[in-house]
Amino acid sequence: MLTPSDKALVPFVSVDNMMRLVHHTGLEQMITRIANTIEADFLRWDAFDKTPRVASHSDVGVIELMPTSDGDMYGFKYVNGHPKNTAEGLQTVTAFGLLADVQSGYPVLLSEMTLLTALRTAAMSALAAKHLAPKGATTMAMIGNGAQSEFQCRAFKAICGIETVRLYDIDPAATAKCARNLADSGLNVIPCTTGQEAIEGAQIITTCTADKQYATILTDNMVGSGVHINAIGGDCPGKTELHKDILHRSDIFVEFPPQTRVEGEIQALPDDHPVTELHDVFAGRTAGRTSDKQITLFDSVGFAIEDFSALRTVLDLIKDTDMYDDLDMLADPDDPRDLYGMLQRSA
Ligand code: NAD
């Protein structure tokens, strides 16, 4: 069983082992499993410690810590967001995270979370859309074809029944990469040369671009009635994707308002602008989509509980497998008070 062992070894899931785990489980199955765990955890919203993430900003990016606890387990993720990185051959987003046992305070899992963040972000997007997108939606525009994009497309296929994705990126090489990667996915993939072309006939529009500025990926005239917008890339103060007029025409759904009001698209709106919390929609306390004409907007920024859910899923999946390494990261002297003696004896 994966609990703190006699030797106080901590299971560690490397990038290699995460890739093995995804292949072993199946990508869409793993995304679906994470989405189910997120939904279950959002249904016990009151059990969690909730705090906006702790962000350290610089001119070029942000480094964040995302902690939460449900009283039994504690988790956190370390994550960065550096839009300029891709031009230097580095990822825009990298991450790792940890789960710990609240009773002992001992870690029970350390994991890479760059891949896992892509999986959980896609899972959360598709889960929100399951409750908000127009019924029978089959086509999604995918604007921004970077690291997250294929995961988003596969999640919407698995969870929302999307059949066609219309791709657009300012960098045609990114669109070509995304189309190539999705060739065997079972999706009908249509590369487009403008954002306007990409949204034609789409019932769902996902924006997933990276630029550290108030960008206008979608203008008001591009958004017709009845669509669902899944806005992923605006997740930091000074980094948004949608023209403000779209926000005024949309019903806006968020993860955790105290964080989204600082980081999301709604940073452009007054603090009392009405938003709906997704956990209320999942629990049936508040309606999601109520009409065919309504524009629904998931103003996604990524919240700590989603990472906690993703880590819980991984902890479950690696049980009885060899897809982790035991990490010697906790000192464990035979006599807990004899830390010094342990050091002396090791000389
Ligand atoms: P990435 O750098 O790999 O890809 C971003 C893509 O956006 C690039 O291909 C770039 O060419 C494209 N782009 C930039 N400006 C554009 C524009 N005006 N029009 C069309 N395309 C444009 O980044 P990524 O890892 O895919 O992440 C995408 C965004 O999602 C980032 O802003 C990241 O911070 C954010 N993100 C959000 C969450 C969340 O939970 N909400 C989670 C992970 C990442």
Image: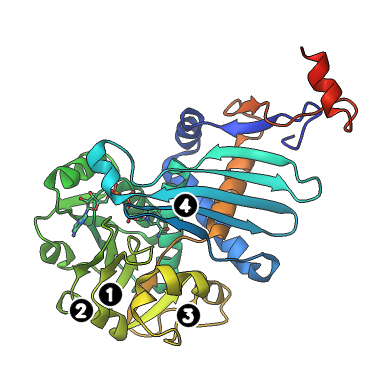
Q: Quadrant of ligand 1?
A: bottom left
Q: CA distance from mark 4 to mark 1?
A: 23 Å
Task: Using the numbered discs, state the Cα–Cα distance from disc 3 to disc 2 in whole angstroms.
Answer: 21 Å
CB at disc 4 and ligand 1 closer than 8 Å: yes
Q: Which residue bears the numbered disc 2?
A: 224
Give how far apart the Cα atoms at labels 1 and 3 are: 17 Å
Which label is found at residue 120?
Answer: 4
First in residue order: circle 4 vs circle 2: 4
**Does residue 150 lie above or below 133 as drawn?**
above
User: Mark 2: which amino acid?
Assistant: Gly
Tag 1 secondary structure = loop
| Residue 227 numbered tag | 1
Residue 260, image x, y percentages: 45, 71
Q: Earlier in the sequence, mark 4 or mark 1?
A: 4
Tell me whether the residue at label 4 lies in contact with that at label 1, contact meaning CB atoms closer than 8 angstroms: no
Instruction: Report x, y in % for residue 107.
Output: 70, 41
